[in-house]
């Protein structure tokens, strides 16, 4: 499966890769050298911690490069009156008699604790392309689903303020 990313997502990932290669990598290598210089490596916690940090950085670089290499580039454009990527949406849940606000983002930016829902999640996928007043059926799996009503759409552009998930 490919991750659906916008050009801006890829740009942000490339910026993070460059930062990690030029800044973080140098710092991590220096930390390993300093810890190694302290002598006996068998009981040197600083050495193992420095190596772990260095490896974690290299792993993140490989992860981001793989994400870019295998990404399916999608557009974040949508019609003025329709729900699209990076739009903030008020959704009324009929069963709970509650209204929730969500921002629809790409998978790498999804964060349910901040009400950033992925365009590939059941709710995000169901909402895309709908208009204010539409009743939308959200299919969770083969046997379960629920209905929501779109109450408000706020058109926003991707300003990069939704940071990419980091490990």
Image: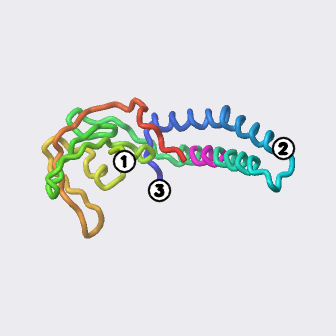
Q: Residue at x 37, y 42 (%)?
A: 105
Return the x and y of residue 142 as percentages of the image width and height.
28, 68
Nearer-N-terminus badge (1/3): 3
Q: Which residue is mark 1?
A: 113
Corner quadrant of residue 114: top left
Element class at badge 2: loop
Q: Residues within 10 Å of mark 1 (few under 14, many from 20)?
A: few
At which x and y percent is residue 38? 84, 43
The residue at the far bottom in this view is 143
Segment tinted magenta in the rendering: 58-64
In the rendered structure, which disc, 3 or 2, sits on the residue that comes first in sequence? Answer: 3
Among the 4 quarters of the image, the one containing residue 141: bottom left
Image spot of residue 91 (x, y percent): 20, 46
Residue displayed at 15% across by 47% down: 134
Q: CA distance from mark 1 to mark 3?
A: 25 Å
Q: Residue at x 40, y 41 (%)?
A: 74
For the point 23% across and 46% down, the residue is 100
Residue of label 3: 1
Estimate how packed mark 3 is, as few (under 14), some (14 to 19) or many (20 or more) residues with alpha carbons within 10 Å: few
Image location of residue 23, percent across then percent down: 66, 32
Mark 1, secondary structure of its residue: helix
Q: Residue furthest right?
A: 39
Find out whether residue 38 is within the magenta segment.
Answer: no
Tag shown at residue 11: none
71 lies left or right of 124: right
Give the main secondary structure of the magenta stretch.
helix
Q: Nearer the viewer, mark 1 or mark 3?
A: 1
Q: Is 144 above or below relative to 115? A: below
Disc 2 marks which residue? 38
* Left or right for 43, reference 98: right
Sequence-wise, which precedes: disc 1 or disc 2?
A: 2
Mark 3: which secondary structure? Answer: loop
């Amino acid at each position: 499966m490919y991750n659906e990313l916008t050009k801006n997502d890829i740009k942000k990932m490339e910026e993070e890769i460059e930062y990690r290669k030029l800044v973080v990598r140098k710092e991590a290598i220096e930390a390993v050298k300093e810890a190694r210089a302290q002598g006996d490596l068998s009981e040197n916690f600083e050495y193992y911690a420095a190596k772990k940090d260095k490896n974690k950085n290299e792993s993140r670089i490989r992860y981001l490069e793989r994400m870019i290499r295998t990404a399916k580039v999608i557009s974040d454009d949508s019609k003025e009156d329709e729900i699209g990527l990076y739009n903030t949406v008020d959704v009324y849940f009929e069963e709970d008699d509650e209204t929730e606000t969500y921002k629809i983002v790409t998978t790498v930016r999804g964060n349910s604790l901040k009400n950033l829902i992925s365009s590939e999640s059941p709710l995000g996928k169901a909402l895309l392309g709908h208009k204010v007043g539409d009743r939308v059926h959200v299919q969770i799996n083969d046997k379960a689903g629920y209905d929501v009503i779109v109450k408000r759409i706020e058109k926003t552009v991707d300003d990069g303020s939704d940071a990419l998930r980091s490990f």
